[in-house]
Every structure is written in structure tokens, then in C-alpha cells.
Image (cartoon, rainbow, N blue to C red):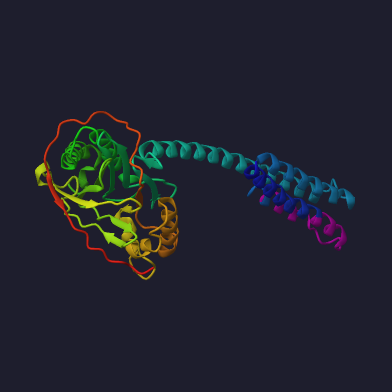
Amino acid sequence: MAGRRQPWQSSHALLMIPIALILVITMVDQLVPADIHLGPLLVIAPAITVSFAGPWVTGLIGFLAVTAQAYIGWHFGVLFSRNVLVQSLALAVLSALTVFYCVVRERRLRQLAQVRAVAEAAQHVLLWPLPERIGPLTIACLYLAAEDEAQIGGDLYAATSTDTGVRVVIGDVRGKGLSAIGEAALIIGAFREAAHEHTLLPELAAALERSVARNLPDLVPEEETGERFATVLLVEMPDEGRLTRILSCGHPPPLLLSPAGTVTVPVHPAPPLGIGAPTPTEYTLDVFSFEPEDTLLLYTDGVIEARDPGGVFYPLAERAAQWAGSAPEELLHHLRRDLLAHVGGRLEDDAAIIALCRTPETHRHRRGTHMGRSAHGTGNAVPLQTHTLPD
């Protein structure tokens, strides 16, 4: 109710401006010498009203302006003179034109609102909001699209709970904005299905590669064939134990925030999706310990490649370390504000960040189907070299 009352009060306050103009012009015109005519200035009233009001209010103000012009003519006893009649007719025509313009504008605004609603619904269906809690994790996500009026672009993320744990994907399609949504949708759809069919991450990565190789040519213009690819990072956190497995296909490594400091998790990246087709045994699986109360920060290169006016890249690790003890949602709130301040309010590329916090609880609601066949990939447990960043 408060949200509705505020625009109503604002529009009515603005409405006093053209009414006051009509009154002032009418009174002043009666006080100035007879050879000075201020009546034509009444056209200002409907011209101002059309900027904030609808056609009915604009028409009312136009009618009041014509009435004021007629009153001025009647006051001086020249109501039916040729000069006053022409001025009144001209004012009526101009008022009618402003009303017509207002009607056209309102119709286009309704069409735009409908198109925007459909676009937002489509974007919501494509990029489902991540749950606040899944398995042993508390999750928060942030998406900043570079394209105006868009909520998604070439960056992507998804999370699902399987029979053995939680799997998360974050990725970045080459390009930005609306032109990259098709490729992002392809990868998200493939992940949501394949995440429940393959036991190991190398198998999952190979399945995503096959899906991209099979469907990407239908989405890419002929002149860009072979130039489109996507980087992805796959993360798997089992329900039992603290070891977390990650597999990178050309994607930036995640950050691990803990009381001991901020750590860049080492990865051995494979080629991005769409460039090569490694077999499951050719992928490298990196393993690290994800302790309770730690926060894992996944991000796309739109974050770390964001530049300030002086060309300096955004120091994500340093800035994130300042809020290492914050809850995921609070952490992303700080990062969003800090990132936009760094770039001056506008990003040149899409940016996505996911914050995952492991809680002491290990209970989760199981959902999804039984896992399919298994395969073996290369697994490397990588020791983390911790460096504490200053607060």
C-alpha cells in the first residue's frame, strides 16, 4: 500500500504545477497593459502535464487552459474577436495533439511492460534461482548482466542435489549479453540432466562436451563456426566427508575463504567446452578440503576482469577477504556494491558469483534419480597454499 501511495502522491503533487501556471498566467494577463497578451503561454500547461500524467489528466489540463483563454477574452470583452478565437482554437488543437501523443505513449509503454514481463519470465525459467539451502550448503548467488534491461546473459550457473551429494556448475559463454543466452541455456539444460546420470565429474564434463558439440552448430551463425566456446567449473560436494572435488574446463579457479585466510584453489584446467573433446580419463579432477564454516566463492571472469576508470582490474581475492566471516548473502551484498563502485556503476561484461558455505549439519533433503553407470577419471589431491590477506 505504501508503494502505491507514493507514486499517487507524487503525480498529484506534480499536477499542481500546470494548474498553478494556468492560474498565474490568467491573473497576470489581467494586470499587464492591454497591448500585452500572455494567453498563448497557457500551452505550457498541457505540454508539461504530458510528461508525467495520462491522457485523461492531460486532456483535463488542456480543457482548463482553453477555458482560461476564453475567460481572458471574456474579461476584456473580446471573446468573439478573431484574435481570441484563433488563439483558443490553436490551444485546443495543441492540447488534442498532446493527448494523442499521450495515448500512443501509454499504448507503447503497456506493450513494453508486457514484453519485459515475458522476457523476465523466460529468463527466470532459464536461470532458476538457487535455493538458499541445499544439502550441507548455504548458497547465495549474484548475477550482473552487462546488457541493459537484461537479467541474464552469457554467464550461467546451476546447482542440483544428487544421490551422493551436491553438484554445482558455473560457466561463461564466449560473448556477452542476449546473443550468448542460447549457448548458456544449452549448457544449463545439459548439466541438469547429465548431473544425475554420471557418477564422476570427468564423465559429466565429457557429457557436457558432447552436448555442446552436437547442438552448438545450430545456435551459432555460420560465420562464427568454430569460434564459440564456453568455460565451466564443476564442483561436487559429497554429503559425507569434507573432501570437495572440482573440475575446470578453462574456467577461473574458485576462492576458499576461511579463518586462516583467503586461498585460490589450484586447478588443472582442461580445454573449454566446444574446443576439444577429451575423454573422461583425460580430465584432471582436483580435490581439496572444504571445512565447516568455510566459504567457497565461484565466479566468472567478468568479475576479475572488471576495470576501474584507470584500467585496474578488480582485486576479488583481496576484497573478498575483508568479509570472509560474513554469511553468503551478506558477502555477495558487499561484493556487489564494491564491484559496481570499482567500475563506476556499469560492467562491460556479464558477471556472476556464487557463495557456498558448508554448515556443520550434513542432513539434506534427497531429490533426483538414482545415479547411472560409473567411470574413472584422474583425481589429484592438491595441497592448498594459504596466504592471509590483510583486513
Q: Position of residue 30 (x, y in %)?
A: 87, 57
Is residue 121 among the parts visible in the rendering?
yes
Q: In this view, does 208 lie to the left or right of 126?
A: left
The N terminus is located in which quarter?
Answer: top right
Q: Where is residue 57 in the image (x, y as percent from the top left)?
A: 70, 42
* Span colored in magenta: 24-47
Residue at figure coordinates x 80%, y 58% from the top left: 37
In the rendered image, the vertical position of residue 298 relative to residue 364, given as above or below: below
Please identify the dominant SS of the magenta region.
helix
Q: Position of residue 388 (x, y in %)?
A: 31, 66
Q: In this view, does 144 lie to the left or right of 19?
A: left
The C terminus is located in which quarter?
Answer: bottom left
Q: In this view, does 98 lie to the left or right of 224?
A: right
Q: Which of 122 and 51 is in front in this view?
A: 122
Q: Nearer the viewer, residue 77 or 20?
A: 20
Q: Nearer the viewer, residue 356 or 340?
A: 356
**Quick check: is 30 in the magenta stretch?**
yes
Q: Where is residue 283 in the image (x, y as percent from the top left)?
A: 13, 47
